[in-house]
Image: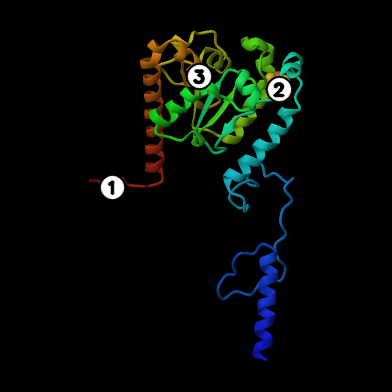
Amino acid sequence: MARNIREAMIQRLEGLEGAGVTHVPKGRKLPDTPPVAQPHSVVPQVGTAEGGCATRESPTDQRAAALAEVEREVSACTRCTELARARTQTVFGVGNPCARLVFCGEAPGADEDRIGQPFVGRAGQLLTDIIVKGMKMRREDVYILNILRCRPPGNRNPLPAEAAACREFLDRQLEIIQPDYICCLGSVAAQNLLDTTESIGRLRGCVHDYRGIPVVCTYHPAYLLRNPSVKRSVWEDIQMLMAEMERKSGRRRAEDGVVPVKD
Ligand code: SF4
């Protein structure tokens, strides 16, 4: 009898395991019906009750799925006829879907168009150095994107109509990622995002706002490669950004009631 019960329980547990149940609460009745897995096409809405912590997916999974959905649309986009015809591929963006910090450049160049990722090549390596050596973060901790997702021929600046056409994708990416800060790299990115004609020299050194997200502007890494004399200015901008981020972290810790431990 005991042997029959044991075998029946093993069989039941194996069935639950096969259905994705990883543990059974102690002292509780086994569920009659195993939970049904959600189809992958059902993407929870980020920032809604439906997409909150009640689902089994982590916030990172939810945001990655939502970003993948937008990326699918971008890869088929032909709003800018000239760019869509000339591109090798679209360059959507790369990084942590839950990043606190988003770097925004202007548009893919030849290397980015070939590889399909923003900020590769020498300028990309310099940006990595700024993130890793300067900010003591990892490149995969941040998210990197551009104003445009297609390369303008000959690396010309984005036309206003192209930037306007691609803005919807940029905004949707930012809505999903919900960063605490944006860092604009170069005048084209800063002017487009902030809708201004001010020079980068005048835009840097203070914190701007884009839809409630604080924005810091600095020189583009490619400009820094050509003009090493602005290195000090870039470092000042990055230090200001880090101080802002640290201040926000401190405020969050205080709101969460975490008391710093004194030495
Ligand atoms: S730049 Fe943006 S809007 Fe224009 S074709 Fe590419 S993805 Fe579409």
Residue at image location 62% in from the left, 54% down from the top: 56
Q: Nearer the viewer, residue 44 or 108?
A: 108
Residue under circle 1?
261
In this rendering, the answer to whether 235 lies above or below 179 is above
User: Where does label 2 land, which residue?
Assistant: 88
Q: Which class describes the residues within 10 Å of circle 1: few (<14), some (14-19), or many (20+)? A: few
Q: Circle 2: is it few (<14), some (14-19), or many (20+) Cα within 10 Å?
A: some
SS at badge 2: loop
1 or 3: mark nearer the eye: 3
Q: Is residue 225 left or right of residue 10?
A: left
Is residue 193 at least partly visible in the picture?
Answer: yes
CA gap, disc 1 and disc 3: 37 Å
**On the image, numbered disc 3 is attached to which residue?**
185
Quarter of the rendered structure image containing ligand 1: top right
Q: Is residue 195 left or right of residue 71?
A: left
Res. 147 visible in picture: no
- Nearer the camera: disc 2 or disc 3: 2
Residue drawn at the location 58% of the way across and 50% of the way down = 53
Q: Amino acid at mark 2?
A: Thr
Identify the residue at image location x=57%, y=70%: 25
Residue 252 percent location from the top left of the image: 41, 40
Helix, strand, or loop for circle 3? strand
CB under 8 Å between callouts 2 and 1? no
Callout 3 amino acid: Leu
